Amino acid sequence: MIFVVTLGLAGALLTTPAAAAGTTYYVDNRVAACDDAGAGTSTTQPWCGFAPITARTFTAGDRILLARGASWRERVQLQGEGAAGAPITFGAYGSGDRPRLLNTGLGWGVRMINPSHWQVSAIEVDGSGSDKLDAGIQVRFDGAAGIGHEELRFSDVSVHHNQIGIAVTGTAAPAASQWAIKGLTMARVEGAHNEVSIAFGNASAPLHFIRDAVLTDLFLHNDDGAPAAEVGCANALTLQSMTGVLLTNSVITDAGGCPIWSGTTGVYLGHAADVTIMNNIIVNTNQTGSPDQGGVSLEGDTDNVALRGNYIGGNVRWGVEVQAIHTWGNTAVTIDSNAIAFNGEDPIAVLGSASTPTGTISGNLWEGDALTYAGSGGTFDGFTIGTNPGPVTSTRVWYTARDYATGQGQYGWRYERSSDSGVTWSPLTYQPATQDWRPAPGSLPLVSKWSWHPGGAGSQVSRSWTAPAAGTIAIAGQAAKGVVGGDGVRVRILKNNTTVLAPTAVGGADRIGVRTNVTSLSVAAGDVIRFAVDAGAAGANSYDTVNWTPVIGYL
């Protein structure tokens, strides 16, 4: 598989200075008194469109807010630099649906030039049409001016029916100790029916072009290039030109929905280092007759990439591909504590003979004819392969995030709390407003799809699973702090209130966490396997959100 992002510089626009720092600008083309020649600083006389935005360079604390429920068939260019603690915001105001930017046929919907300290939130970019947008949101860091930028945040953003939903790229060439952008965050970003939903970097940008990225709660789905592909559906998420990445708590499904000669996958990694892909669902890459068609593909020139605690399944071919088709290979690969099951081919493949990948494979719950496959001269000689429980004999595995439900007992799972250090347990109540389980609205403890938060000293919160049949099971998972702070938590596993995994500490700043594996455990029908979290030895409860998505399978 080969994937390259190239987006040109055409269409750069002249700018004029913005008003004083800290100004809030409003845009609503439905207001009769809207005026692009006005100040745009009131909701009663907002700007009508995007020309005044594109014409300005914004400064620290400025906010550009689009009216919810409104839509524009215009594109907008954003320029300027915020400051630490005073970012520039491009977002929404009012009530209703996200403001929508519609396809203009002019290449991109939103363009950001060398941004520092920006927040983009609560917008939708719809690239559908006969000439779809090359990028719904394009972020460029170009030339010498593109070096040394910090803090770029996207949240509650939807991009769909584009060639690329969000592209972060550019020509900047930072030295080894530098970067183009450092501190990039994406949370609650949805991409659908793009050819590629999110793409970072490009083939010529250095490994450290992007530093320290956290990607959480992404929902990238049905990337099929609808209604018609222009280039091809290589993947849903491209991680390249990056050093220091955490991808967590995300769903990536039905990628590669249109053919491309280079191959398709759910997540592509190339020219990347120090990447952790943890506690995600990566499933159902499509059958298009393309090469690869797997869940995760390490193309080459990667170092210290770790896959931990994910569910990777339902893909046409392999769950994880470690390519060895280039001399610039993949080193220090860690594949640990995942569930890799029900793919069309074996769970993990090394393909090619131009290099010898290195790393470790351990603790994975797997299904298939064999754990590994070496093709086209590939070899696992550079890997240390530990204990990996499998093959799974059940027709499914029970992955907590995938099975998360609004009713007790669904898929065998119950959501419970204890206020007496685990002696007795009582049910939590599902809260539709927050989509989690709590004793009452706004209270602790809680359990959500990905995360848990205990209730303080003497309190535990749990998910329990009731075995549907007798047999031998295995458990895999990775528990890590969801936020940095506090004194940490403890996780444990019990069978009928007998300890299976002893209380294990997760430190307050540990976003990588600890493995929570049980390689073999006999159960009878009706036995209860309980996964529990408490506030730690001291009982302090601040910042105690923990991400943990254990999985169970019968052997």
Image (cartoon, helix red, strand yellow):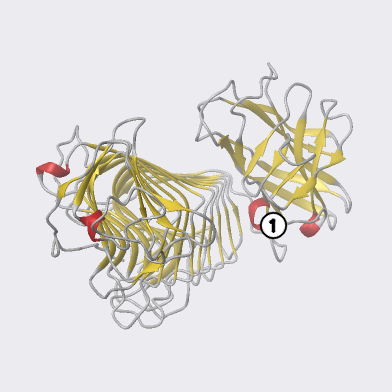
Q: Is residue 465 above or below residue 530?
A: below
**Front one among 522 and 493:** 493
**Front one among 307 and 98:** 98
Left or right: residue 430 compared with residue 247: right
Q: Residue 123 location, x and y as percent?
A: 42, 58
Numbered circles on residues, count: 1
Q: In the rendered image, which quarter is residue 150 located in?
A: top left
**Front one among 324 and 240:** 240
Left or right: residue 311 compared with residue 45: right
Q: Residue 20 location, x and y as percent?
A: 25, 37
Q: What element does badge 1 sit on?
A: helix
Q: Residue 450 location, x and y as percent?
A: 61, 47
Q: Is residue 272 above or below residue 193?
A: above
Q: Residue at x 77, y 59 (%)?
A: 411
Left or right: residue 154 compared with residue 308: left
Q: Residue at x 26, y 41 (%)?
A: 181
Q: Is residue 251 visible?
A: yes
**Front one among 281 and 30:** 30
Q: Is residue 555 visible?
A: no
**Location of mark 1 (residue):** 403
Amino acid type of disc 1?
Answer: Asp
Q: Residue 275 location, x and y as percent?
A: 39, 43
Left or right: residue 421 compared with residue 398: right
